Image: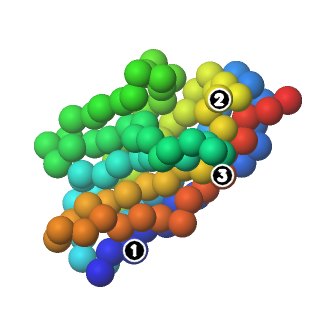
Amino acid sequence: QVHVVESGGGLVQPGGSLRLSCVASGSIYSINPIFWYRQASGKERELVAAITSGGSTNYANSVKGRFTISGDNAKNTAYLQMNSLKPEDTAVYYCAVSRYGNTYWGQGTQVTVSS
């Protein structure tokens, strides 16, 4: 069993920054691969960033140049650094870990970008 917990969301003004954290525990030996998704109200959940098992990173076009995904294997923790935030970034952000034929989701953390 794998347990995933996100944290770090909150209210931020446009142009501000937030750093989300994702801690994975259980039968996991590397933080990679790991995925960050988000789901805005009334929209589908979308993939925004990922680290592959080999350590390479991928980003949705909408966040390239603004978001950075990283991982710390010693802590079994992944991060999503979000800069230059826009109102359209408002969403619940989820961390997901796929292992052993299953995908394990965190509970989500709310990010609200507003004045």
Residue type pointed to by label 1 = His
Q: Are marks 2 and 1 in contact (CB under 8 Å)?
A: no
Q: Nearest the camera: 14 or 17?
A: 14
Residue 16 position in % (x across, y down): 70, 28
Q: Pick whichever of labels 2 and 3 is earlier in the sequence.
A: 2
Residue 93 position in % (x across, y down): 54, 49
Residue placed under numbered mark 2 in the picture = 88
Residue placed under numbered mark 3 in the picture = 110
- Disc 2 versus disc 3: nearer the observer: 2
**Who's the residue at 29% across and 81% down the image?**
1
Residue 89 position in % (x across, y down): 61, 33
Residue type pointed to by label 3 = Gln
Q: CA distance from mark 2 to mark 3?
A: 13 Å
In the image, which disc is placed on residue 3?
Answer: 1
Q: CA distance from mark 2 to mark 1?
A: 29 Å
- The answer to which image quadrant residue 57 occupies is top left
Residue 95 position in % (x across, y down): 44, 55
In the rendered image, the residue lying farthest to the top is 65
In the rendered image, the residue lying farthest to the right is 115
Mark 1 crowdedness (10 Å alpha carbons): few <14, some 14-19, many ≥20: some
- How is the protein colored in the picture? rainbow
Q: Nearest the camera: 14 or 23?
A: 14
Q: Pick whichever of labels 2 and 1 is earlier in the sequence.
A: 1
* The C terminus: image quadrant: top right
Q: Pick whichever of labels 1 and 3 is earlier in the sequence.
A: 1
Mark 2 crowdedness (10 Å alpha carbons): few <14, some 14-19, many ≥20: few
Q: Secondary structure at mark 3?
A: strand
Q: Nearest the camera: 74 or 51?
A: 51
Vertical arrangement, residue 6 with respect to residue 25, above or below = above
